[in-house]
Image (spheres, rainbow, N blue to C red):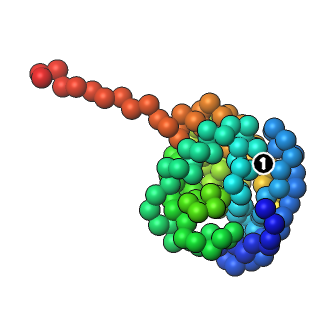
Amino acid sequence: MAGALRCPRDGADARLETTSGPRRRFRLDVCPRCGGAFFDRGEIAKISGDHEMERMIVEYAAGASGLACPRCGREMAIRPVGDITLDVCPSCRGVWVDSGELEAAAGTLRGQVPPMSTSNDMIGLARAAMMAHAAFGPTATLRLLLNPKIKRQVPEDL
């Protein structure tokens, strides 16, 4: 999608950066100040190779996030994924991720501390590519986190 974006967190002009993901080339709008990134509709599917994963993130978002979508300006909704919360636009179906959120989701999936720093020392194209690869590499486990199996226990005395 065309058009310059402003970061919904700090108002900085995002840079449109192109890189190769684990599946194919993609472009992300990345904030040079905070390291956040905006995934336009379809970009999560391009990176992960899994349209269902993107659908689960977007369609199960609910509740006001307090952020305006950097693409269309409408209010975004929240989507919990493990210990983090993604900001999703129900209108244009874009997803805003703050610095460190995708790494935290990947760490949650793997049951470990994220291997990358969540500070702003690695901003821009390299950070966006590493965020995408870390979060969307293990598609089966991410799908399980987005759509967990629920174990129900029935009391024995019933």
| Residue bearing mark 1 | 130
Residue at point 62% right, 74% down?
73
Q: Residues within 10 Å of mark 1 (few under 14, many from 20)?
A: some
Q: Is residue 104 above or below residue 155?
A: below
Q: Is residue 133 above or below residue 38?
A: above
Residue toward you, 109 or 24: 24
Residue 21 placement (x, y as % from top left): 82, 44
Residue toward you, 102 or 42: 42
Specify the quadrant of the image occupied by residue 91. Answer: bottom right
Label count reads 1
Residue at point 67% right, 34% down?
138
Residue 35 placement (x, y as % from top left): 73, 64
Q: Is residue 154 above or below residue 55?
A: above
Q: Element at badge 1? A: helix
**Left or right: where 23 falls relative to 51:** right
Query: Is any part of residue 4 visible from this angle?
Result: yes
Residue at point 76% right, 44% down?
46
Residue 30 placement (x, y as % from top left): 77, 64
Residue 81 placement (x, y as % from top left): 53, 48
Q: In the orientation shown, which residue stands out farthest toward the bottom?
A: 11
Q: In the orientation shown, which residue stands out farthest toward the top?
A: 156
Specify the quadrant of the image occupied by residue 97. Answer: bottom right
* Quadrant containing the N terminus in the rendered view: bottom right
